[in-house]
Amino acid sequence: MHRMTILAMFFFLIGSGLHTLAQVDAIARAKNNPNNSRVTIFKSRWQTILIRAAWSVAIFVLWLQGQLVAVLAATKISVPDSLAGVLDLHVSGAVAFMAGYLFDSALAFIPGLKNSVPAAIDADSSTGKVDGAAPKA
């Protein structure tokens, strides 16, 4: 039983990681992004990536333990029958992979956890002003 849980978690993390890599690649290819280095983008967004991964893993562990529907019901979130049917599935490697990819994708729609790069800070070296802010002391 534990071996299947470890295997499911492994495939879940692969799916989540692939979605993260796909988003970093999309940011790097964006025409309005002056920074096309994937490593730099990852370094600038690592906090968001870790937060999304942690929430995804927490939700997935609740699903593996069979407690996700109970947690949703306790928080008064209605679970449609179609979703309850999916949550009753045996979590194989393929299901875990898809869940990892989809959970990370769903969390990317939450403001603050989106896949966008923060706005660049432009500093005028002669005045020390940052985007119209007061000069540095």
Image (cartoon, helix red, strand yellow):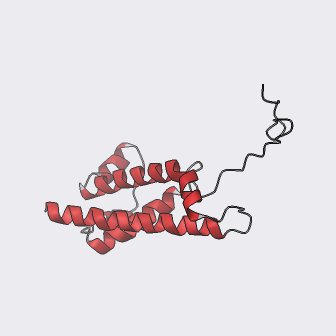
The reply, left or right, for residue 109 in relation to residue 126 is left
The reply, left or right, for residue 63 in relation to residue 114 is left
Which residue is painted at 55% across and 61% down in the image? 39
In the image as oriented, which residue stretches furthest toward the top?
Answer: 137
Q: Confirm whether residue 81 shows in the render.
A: no
Compared with 97, 80 (above or below) is above
Quarter location, residue 6: bottom left
Instruction: In this rendered view, identify the residue nearer to me: 59 or 2.
Output: 2
Q: Confirm whether residue 6 shows in the render.
A: yes
The x, y position of residue 70, in whole percent, is 30, 49
Q: Quadrant of the N terminus?
A: bottom left
The x, y position of residue 9, in whole percent, is 28, 62
The x, y position of residue 77, in whole percent, is 42, 49
Instruction: In this rendered view, identify the residue nearer to me: 44 or 126.
Output: 126
Q: Quadrant of the C terminus?
A: top right
Instruction: In this rendered view, identify the residue nearer to me: 75 or 9.
Output: 9
In the image as oriented, which residue stretches furthest toward the left?
Answer: 1
Count of marks overlaid on the render: 0
In the image as oriented, which residue stretches furthest toward the bottom?
Answer: 94
The x, y position of residue 7, in whole percent, is 23, 66
Quarter location, residue 17: bottom left
Which residue is painted at 40% across and 55% down in the image? 56
Which residue is painted at 43% across and 61% down in the image? 103
Which residue is painted at 29% across and 54% down in the image? 61
Instruction: In this rendered view, identify the residue nearer to me: 88 or 19.
Output: 19
The reply, left or right, for residue 105 in relation to residue 134 is left
